[in-house]
Amino acid sequence: MEDKVIIRTKNVNFFYGGFKALTDISMDFQSRHVTALIGPSGCGKSTLLRLLNRMNDLIDGTRVEGQVLFEGVDIYDPKVDPVDIRRRIGMVFQKPNPFPKSIFNNITYGPKLAGMTRRSDLEELTEWSLKQAVLWDEVKDILGQSAMMLSGGQQQRLCIARALAMKPDVLLMDEPTSALDPISTAKIEELIQDLKKQYTIIIVTHNMQQAARVSDKTGFFYLGKLIEYDETETIFTRPHVRQTEDYITGRFG
Amino acid sequence: MQTATPHASVRWRYIKQHLFFAVVRLSAALIALALGGLLVYIFLHGREAISWSFLTLPPTDSMTKGGIMPAIIGTFYLTLGAIAVALPLGIMSAIYLSEYARQGPVVRIIRIGVNCLAGVPSIVFGLFGLGLFVVFLQFGSCILSGALTLGVLILPTIIGASEEALKAVPQTFREASLALGVSKWQTIFRIVLPNALPGILTGSILGIGRAAGETAPIMFTAAAFYTVKLPSSIFDEVMALPFHIYVLATAGTHIEATRPIQYGTVLVLVALVLGVDLIAILIRSYIRKRKRW
């Protein structure tokens, strides 16, 4: 089971109107691994990430070609409800985006609407998710207070806890630390190492050291194409493609 | 302390700046003065007429004496009815326009239509209400017809304000909710709408003021020249404050004799509108305090 593939993209093309943002992406994402997507701005890595839980559906005039298989099922099949997909593939965004609600209500918002109603279940789940996100000790006495009172780093861990409360299989992270200070960033990176024991994590990052530190596999994107995809160690020590080497050594241009 | 005297051009810049600030300040003061003057004028002329019996008794002696109680009640019902019609309809339309509809020519045409509706003279709404509600649907001249007509009149205000308020809710809230596997309509009702409510209420405040103060739309659809009897159902005709003022000031046989009553009625109408506004503002600030981001 170690190397089970949980998400597989097959020859995926993606268009914003007439603009082709992704070209022929075929990629396997392994279960309970951390996969990093790197590349310069506008290379399509975030687009690919948001494609994996159908968040791109929200943008008018976009079109997908090819297949995105999640446990063997094409998530772009018309019979598939994106709501079901998003319950199993959670997402953490670039900027912490807690709701203007209490910490408790932030965590229980999703599970409540998914049908969990018993107060004791919700309280248990809140404690469990906050512990998973290593935030419990900091907020256990202020669960009723607004999430907006927390620091940026705490807010981002709250957003991770909120995503985990849905008990997803996969966690997509879109530059989760780019708005945070170094200490909060270190905490989140540590957290990612913990979480990969139970979850599949796919992370977009602009920070190359971060990709090297946290990920098992790394994919390098350039101009909407997957240039190189390999073990992180290989990518950062012996890349096979010249463009990859230029990018990770900062000689890009 | 710097001793160097400012260069002439710098000094000129300061003068220009002060001049500009003075003009801006004057404009604001002028507006405040106009509003304040109006209110003071109405208050001074109207306060003599105001008494407990003026507020609680119907008019007597060919409307030259007595009170205006039926008109207060009538305006209250009409305004309440208009809001009850326009608020749900307006909010739903705004949700459709800003959340569901694919942005394109159709939505643009609808939006232009809504904006045009806001500019239509109120007498046109009165005739529309007469044609549709009073005659065609055979409601007759009554609270229902008047409330519906006023409702249509304030619909554009409410749609416009609601749309702005919905747009002001950060996109990140919607994304956060949807990414948790929450459906679109649940996202709208649980996240977007509650956060847009203060803005929507602001729009309704303007709507309430307009509905309470308009004369032309209710002239043919709801307002009675004179009736002592209070409405017992929505199919009854009522007196209304703006129409009562209009009648006393133009159509009565004792125009000069009823001046104090006219001012008194105006004062009551203004106080009523401001009172309703105040309630809405209080509700809004309460919600704002609770929901902060």
Image: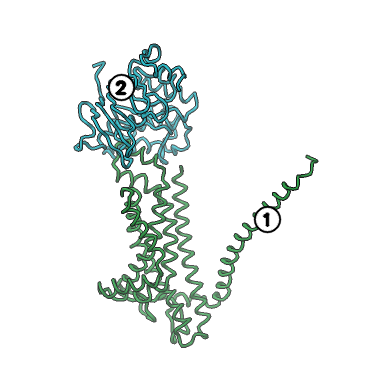
Chain colours: A cyan, B green
Name the residue tied to disc 2: A198
Assign the N terminus of chain B to one quadrant of the image.
Answer: top right
Image height of B66 relative to A208, above or below: below
Mark 1: amino acid: Leu
Q: Is residue A248 left or right of residue A63?
A: right
On the image, numbered disc 1 is attached to which residue? B19
Task: Give whichever of B203, B119 is nearer the camera.
Answer: B119
Q: Is residue B114 left or right of residue A64?
A: right
Q: Chain of mark 2?
A: A
Could you classify mark 1 by the number of other residues whose Cα lies within 10 Å: few (under 14), some (14-19), or many (20 or more)?
Answer: few
Residue A95 image offset from top left, x and y in percent: 43, 34
- SS at mark 2 in the image: loop
State whether residue B95 is above or below residue A53: below
> From where the camera sits, is residue A170 visible?
yes
Amino acid type indicated by mark 2: Gln
On the image, the x and y values in percent for residue A162 come to 36, 33
Residue B203 horizontal/vertical position (percent): 43, 57
In depth, the one of A238 and A164 nearer the eye is: A238
Instruction: Give x and y (percent) for residue A113.
Output: 29, 40
- Element assignment for label 1: helix
For residue A9, which quarter of the picture? Answer: top left
Q: Quadrant of residue A110?
A: top left
